[in-house]
Amino acid sequence: MVDRCVSADLVPCTVVDLDGTYIKGNTLKIFLKCGLRFLIRHNNYRDFRRLVFVVGKRQLRLSTHTEMRDDIIRILRPYYGGISEEFSRCVKHCINPKVKSLLEDRKTKGHRILLATAASGFYIPSIWEGDFVAECRGSEKPERVMQWLIDNNCKLDTVITDHREDIPLLLANEKGKNILVNPSSSTLASLRSLGNISIMT
């Protein structure tokens, strides 16, 4: 009886991915482009070259994606005041209207909305108003999400994502609703065994 009462008091939560899901594109790439434009406008070719070097290392597989992300943030952090407005504006143009509408509908039904992303938490507040967990992917993401749910008296109801990297989170939501946004054929193949999947195109 106690367990059922506690469960009934939990607030349903919809968890949404950022890049490729809520945003049609990649926020790190958008942030990088805004940063490069800012550096050119201010004739800062030293840091411009540093960024090109960082991206080149990643293209040559001499660094990981996380290392590249952290290096980009480190180089552009001092200039964020001059980048954030353009960055926010560019990201808003890339919001997926169908996902945004779905989230608004979930809110009207009493859901908490949680953004769960591998993107840097450094710039999330300038493009997202609400709760988020950042810099987590793969098996780490459901662990971070579940801890947030516990801390905020919520229960997982819906997961919205575009990528098979979120399979651990989708599996953790086996009794809820899982929505794939414009999934690739490889993502669909990886999730064929899951029965609680719907597709948003």
Image (cartoon, rainbow, N blue to C red):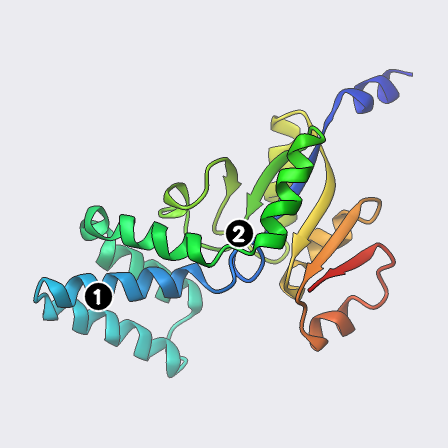
Residue located 64% across and 33% down the image:
107
Give the x, y percent position of residue 58: 37, 76
Up the image or down, 10 lies above or below 120; here it is above
Task: Compare residues 160 and 105 and report the one nearer the observer.
Answer: 105
Residue 78 position within the rendered picture, expressed as x and y whole percent measured from the top left = 18, 50
Kindly identify which residue carries mark 2. 117
Q: Nearer the viewer, mark 1 or mark 2?
A: 1
Amino acid at pointer 1: Arg
* The C terminus: image quadrant: bottom right
* Residues at marks 1 and 2, CA–CA distance in whole angstroms: 25 Å
Which residue is located at x 48 percent, y 65 percent? Answer: 25
Circle 2 — which element?
loop
Of all residues shown, which one is farthest toward the bottom? Answer: 60
Using a 10 Å C-alpha cutoff, classify the residue at mark 1 as few (fewer than 14 neighbours), some (14 to 19) or many (20 or more): few
Name which residue lies at 23% across and 67% down. Answer: 36
Horizontal side of residue 35 vs 109, given as left or right: left
On the question of residue 167 being in view, the answer is: no
Residue, far left: 43
Q: Specify whether residue 95 is in view.
A: yes
User: How far from the left and from the top, in percent, is residue 116?
Assistant: 56, 47
Identify residue for label 1. 37
Q: In which quarter of the image is the N terminus?
A: top right
Q: Which amino acid does label 2 sit on?
A: Thr
Outermost residue toward the right?
A: 1
Mark 1 lies on a secondary structure that is helix
Q: Residue at x 77, y 53 (%)?
A: 171
Image: 50 above or below 146: below
Determine crowd level at label 2: few under 14, some 14-19, many 20+ residues with C-alpha closer than 10 A. many
Q: From what the image shows, is residue 140 above or below residue 29?
A: above
